[in-house]
Image (cartoon, rainbow, N blue to C red):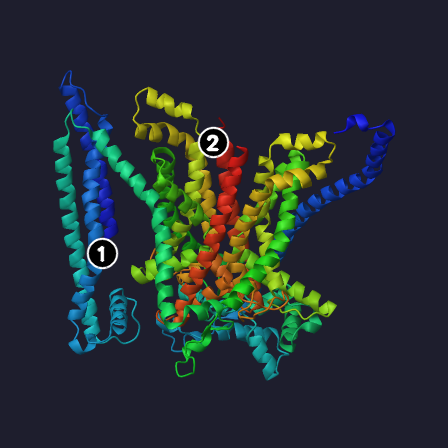
Amino acid sequence: MNNEAQTPTESQRIVDIVIAGLAKRRRAEMRFRFYGLISIIVGLLFLVLLFSSIISQGYTAFVYTNVALDITYDAEKIDPDGSRKAEVLASGDYDSLWKASLFKLFPEVTDRQKKRTLSSFMGSSAGQRLRDRVLAKPALIGTTERIWLPVDDSIDMLAKGRLGNEDELSEKLRDSQTWLHAMQAKGLIHKALNTEFFTNGDSREPDAAGIWGAVTGSAFTLMVTMALSLPIGIAAAIYLEEFAPRNRWTDLIEVNINNLAAVPSIVFGLLGLAVFINLFGFPRSSPLVGGLVLTLMTLPVIIIAGRSALKSVPPSVREAALGVGASPVQMVFDHVLPLAMPGMLTGAIIGLARALGESAPLLMIGMVAFIVDVPTSLSSPSTVLPVQIYLWADSPERAFTERTSAAILVLLAFLIVMNGLAVYLRKHYERRW
Amino acid sequence: MEKSTLLLLILLLSIAAYYCGSQKARRIAGQTEGRRLHSLPGFYGYYTALWVALPALVLMMIWLFGEGPIVTSGALASLPPDVTNTPPERLSLLVNDIRNIAGGSASGDVDPSMLAAADRYLHLERHSNVLLSILAVCASMGGCHFAYKRIDPAFRARNKVERMLTLFLIACALVAIFTTIGIVLSVVIESMRFFQQVPVTEFLFGLKWSPQIAIRSDQVGSSGAFGSVPLITGTLLISLVAMIVAVPIGLLSAIYLSEYAGPRFRATAKPLLEILAGIPTVVYGFFAALVVAPFIRDLGAHTGLDVSSESALAAGLVMGIMIIPFVSSLSDDFINAVPQSLRDGAYALGATQSETIRQVVLPAALPGVVGGILLAVSRAIGETMIVVMAAGLSANLTLNPLEAVTTVTTQIVTLLVGDQEFDSPKTLAAFALGLLLFLLTLALNIIALRIVRKYREQYE
């Protein structure tokens, strides 16, 4: 400002001040940079922690401990009257077969308490498996064979080392561990792929609980969501971007859609409960209602993504189409839409992936019920994978923690596939103008 | 015929109609020299197909709404009058029973009169389906005939088809409006019924929340305590913890990514951070309950602090992690929107990069960042699964993050999950809480979106 008044000594003084401050300012610069880097690292660390804790908890659920037992199909126990009729065979006491085999394996167990502990060594499906074998092949009765049977879930946890060190175990479990070690030494223990986890519905018993019911429910729900939200979302995006006149009404719709995208998902659940279930009388807990609620939730996402995909198609394409005599509708459907489709689908897949992981609104419409049967139609009661995770996470049994983590891994795998598909679509089909 | 088969049949009929229509148009075009068709032959096909499908579909819609009551009343009429002479709630149970028997899923002994009613129900349903099928096919044929006859070179099929299409597009765009109206109506109506039983002032300013008492009607104050203040403070407390975690981490990483990081680092770190946003909230809830909450409790035990195992700190911390990418990607947008000329000006004056960011870029981006943070707050308030799984159920009025608090969303879930009678204040309270939540987040969203929009225009 007053350059003329500045004497050489004064400007020298300013330079000195600046130089004196440089080191400090440099340190401040480095510090600031460091904070930025640290916060990214912290964010990524959380990601790693999340994944590693879930993977380390869950990967063991994909295998299950089996024991090789010499089972004698004692006719007295399973076919007392010797008629070999299916209904008699079906109600036989198959649990006693493996119990007898276990007692034979450990003749030193005579104490009543310990015998009872040994009697709970095998899982609830061991007897069922024996029954299925006999029903399929009645000739087995009276013979002896060595067969692999699943242990109880607490024993499975024990075998996987999930229950802590030896001195923390209860007396019962310590006994079981001794037997387990004895069998391991004889080579009677092996871990097989846990097929029941993938093929069963829910169960109160961790060893019989599987995700198939929830996966089917999720598939049905997502089918409804996709069938409705994709056409409606794309149509709404086309209307708003290409045909709508700019007036107060379309402004209102626009503000509305932006707001809906930010409404908490649980509020959509309240809407589903009040309108679809109480007003329209649709069946509770059904994939139909779940799909409808998720459709309303996903629509704003699909519409917003669809509009930006349409916006990215250059006006020259539109003008060229109109110039050769296409009507506005023909221009949009024959020229603009095909070019915008990959972008629209990318947005739609991301929206659907979010719907697949959503659980809060589905709790409201009763998809949280305990359902054993695998759903067979859009109106049969069912649950979905995220809600199944929530239900299992609430269960106190140690084995359910493992199942929960494994179910999460399955859910994450689905989400990775869907998002990967979206990335692929974007990379390979989206045109840059 | 089942309704799904009928739907398939109508679809097949309209495909056939498309071919007939377009073939006739082509034939006419071939015969009449000199007179050209107004539209492409395909449009005549679409026109015929529309006339086949629409009348039948409209008929089906009407049928679906009317059929239920008629069939059930027919089934009920076959029951002895003393059974049906009950209040409406009992009657709907009865109808449910009949449906179950008819569906073959009834268990135990079934009353013969009920069995007869179920028989009657099935009978009526079958008749109704047959009647519907006949009428629908007739309507289709009628429509087809009408449209087929109108095919003519002068007929403007394209305009008609395009008009129908535009109407469909408008209807789809209106779904968003109807969703909002549906949300508002459903929460407002149920809330009104709630406020008839519990005064608004008690709900808004009451300091005690214990809806469980409402089950026992013989007690004094049988309506329970429905003061929402502890829920709101709990929600805000957890959101505050979440924002304390998310805002610095999110903002600083956005600054680093957009101002310092090289393109390679940015291309890897940004998508990795955004994975955090794609993880389902139920996974975060599980993570909070299984890993974070016990860790914080043990940490508290080591340092001599009394930390609840459902502390607000654990839920808030995990919610903060979830929101990091949200804050960072929004801030990233706004920091990138600040024109380079502002930075260059600061550099020219001798400012270091961090000084430029702190004193020039951030103030310029501030309104947008604040808008983004408000959106994040609204998301934190509405977040459900993390708090349901990791926060407590007891409504403590406290500001101590080490204690267990409950939130609005947690209470909605607890009130509505499981068996419920629809008229009890307990169930209705959930809708009142829903209204509160909706209004709270709506206000935040509107303010935030307005700030964001206004700011975006500034530099464009």
Q: Nearer the viewer, residue A161 or B389?
A: B389
Q: What residue sits 27% from the left and 39% below the top?
A: B167
Label 2 sits on residue:
A429
Residue type at the position of mark 1: Phe
The quadrant holding residue B244 is bottom right
Q: Nearer the viewer, residue B425 or A359?
A: B425
Q: Is residue A64 above or below residue A336?
A: below
- Residue B224, image x, y percentages: 44, 76
Residue A93 visible to the viewer: yes
- Residue found at the very far top of the displayed protein: B34
The quadrant holding residue B263 is top right
In the image, which is nearer the foreground, mark 2 or mark 1?
1
Q: What residue sits 61% from the left and 83% below the top?
A: A111
Q: Is residue B325 above or below residue B47?
A: below
* SS label for mark 2: helix
Q: Nearer the viewer, residue A237 or A97?
A: A237
Residue type at the position of mark 2: Tyr
Q: CA distance from mark 2 to mark 1?
A: 44 Å
Label 1 sits on residue:
B65
Q: Chain of mark 2?
A: A
- Residue B32, image x, y percentages: 13, 19
